[in-house]
Amino acid sequence: MGLEQLYEEIISCEKCTRLRDWCISQEGTKKEYKDDSYWSLPLPGFGDPEARVLITGLAPAAHGGNRTGRVFTGDTSGQYLFAALYRHGFSNQERSFSKDDSLELNDVFITNVVKCAPPKNKPDASEFSACSGFLEKEIQAMENLEVILAFGGQAFERTKRVLRKMDADVSAAKFGHGVKFEFGAGFPVLMGSYHTSLYNINTRRITPEMLDDVFEKVKHVIDK
C-alpha cells in the first residue's frame, strides 16, 4: 500500500470513539483560535514519500495538528522542529503555520504514532493498539527508509513495538536523547530525541544545539 492510499484510510478511521469525540469538541474552545475551522479528523503523516528519514511523534496536539490538518504544524513544538529541519537542509523554510503554506520537506517524512489528538495528550492502550497498524504500513511504504527518529519516550517505545512486530530484535533499545540502535539488514536505525514540547523548551531539557546534534547524527547515518 502506498502513502497516498494510506492517507485516505487514516482520515476515514472511526475506531476510537473517545478520540474522535475529543478532536471534534476542541474547535472553538481556545480563544486564540476561536474563528478557525479545525481539521478534526485523524491526521496522516506528510513529507517526502521517497524520504530516508521518518520522524515519529506521539499524537497530534488538540490546537496544533488537530486544528491545522498537518503534523507538528501550528504549535510551538512544530516551530522548534521545523527550524531545526531547515538548518539541516531537510525543509525549504523554517516556519509553518498551515497545511496550505509553501513548506516542503526533503528526505524527511513526519507522522505520529497515534493519529488523533487525545485528552491530556495521553492515548490509552487500546488507542495505541488501534493505530499501530497505520505506523507499520507507513514504515513498509517508505522504500528508501534508513532512519526513524522518535520524539519523546512514548513515541520511541511505541515505534519500537511496531519494529518488534516486524521481527526486529529491539530488546536492547532504550530511550534517551541522541541514542541510536541498529537492528540489522532490512530494518531502519532507530534514534531518539527529547520532544520539542513547550515544557521541555522552557526548562531547556531540549535546546537548538541539542537538536542540531541529533540531526548531525541522522545525517551521518544516511550519508554513509
Image (tube, rainbow, N blue to C red):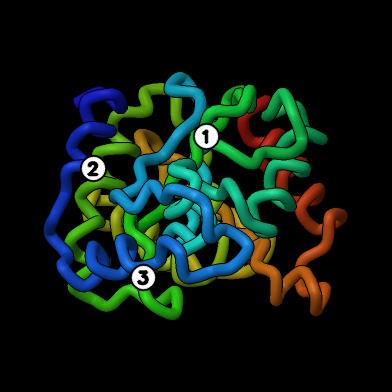
Q: Where is residue 32 in the image (x, y as percent from the top left)?
A: 63, 62
The local secondary structure at tag 3 comes to loop
Residue extending farthest to the left is 15
- Give the residue type that dot 3 points to: Pro
- Residue that mark 1 sits on: 99
**Mark before the other along the chain sequence, 1 or 2:** 2
Q: Which of 117 and 157 is in front in this view?
A: 117
Q: Can you tell which mark lies on residue 118?
A: 3
- Give the residue type that dot 2 points to: Ile
| Quarter of image, res 222 | top right
The local secondary structure at tag 1 comes to loop
The local secondary structure at tag 2 comes to helix
Label 2 to label 3, Cα distance in Å? 16 Å
Residue extending farthest to the front is 35
Q: In which quarter of the image is the N terminus?
A: top left
Q: Can you tell which mark lies on residue 10?
A: 2
194 vs 84: above or below: below
